[in-house]
Amino acid sequence: MSSMLDTAAEQMMVEQDFQEAFDTCDRGLGSLANMDQEDSRCGELKAGFCMLGMQALAELNQWQGVLSWIIQQYEHQEKIPAKIMQMCILLYSKVGEPAMMQDAARVWLHCPSNSRVTGFGMVAELYLLHVLVPLGDRDEALQLIHGDVGSFAFTEDQRQTALDVVEEKERRNEELPPDPGIRPDSEIATHSTTGSVIRKLEAMLRCFYRKVLLAGSGSFSIRKVFIAAVLLYMLLLRTDPALPSSFMWISKLLQLLRQMWTAMFAPYHQALTQRL
């Protein structure tokens, strides 16, 4: 079984043959079903096969079936190990479907035997931050924090932090614009991405600009500089210059190119003017 688990890991990480890795995990789990389930080594191997199998399904873009496949291996939701439950919550949050984990995680957290396992607090934290808060389920979030789950999972400081997170989410929801067609989270993410790309472009061009200054007077071709800058702009942004959203990008590029031009040719222009 250990050798089969190593093979699945190699197929997953080295060969990147995700389908073969999943098939190996499935065969390993089938073999483990005939072994003594009380053996701790059996439980560790089973968890290892499940975690690799989850990753393989995600790479195959079959993430919709991950939770049902895991429940099939453990038969009951509350028997899923904490580390696998954590991975499931993160996976479905990553693909933008946290609601698919709500029922399973709720059942798992309210199972009394799970409150004593290692990782219970992490499952509760991930469930709150990656499921309840994104879904805007304030009532269940408050019940989780103040109820039995919160008393087992969080310290007093952690409960206060969790309450602050829920209140901040509620405050943001109240500040949403009235237009239902606008999704503020997406808009914020878009502006954040736009700003980061602009900063990245500025940093790269400024680095290029410094190299131009150090290159010397006659050893650098301005044609190559201009072509490289334009190609860099096109590769990074790929925007239509006719669009209003492109004006800011073009302005930044033009400003940096002017600085490069001035730094390279201003001394010669001044010297020529003085001679005249």
Image (cartoon, helix red, strand yellow):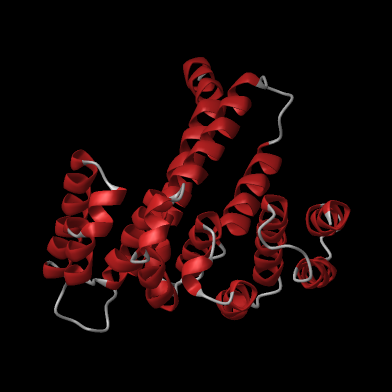
Residue at 35%, 62% in the rendered image: 112
Residue 22, horizontal then vertical, whole percent? 77, 70
Residue 98, horizontal then vertical, whole percent? 41, 72
Q: Quadrant of the N terminus?
A: bottom right
Count of marks placed on residues:
0
Picture quadrant where residue 243 is located: bottom left
Residue at 35%, 70% in the rendered image: 106
Residue 46 lies left or right of residue 261; in this view the side is right
Residue 14, horizontal then vertical, whole percent? 84, 52
Residue at 43%, 74% in the rendered image: 104
Residue 48 lies left or right of residue 122; in this view the side is right
Instruction: Give 43 or 225, whichever is nearer the viewer.
Output: 43
Q: In this rendering, does residue 241 appear at all?
A: no
Residue at 54%, 39% in the rendered image: 205
Residue 32 lies left or right of residue 149; in this view the side is right
Residue 79, horizontal then vertical, whole percent? 52, 67
Name above or below for residue 62 compared with residue 46.
Answer: below
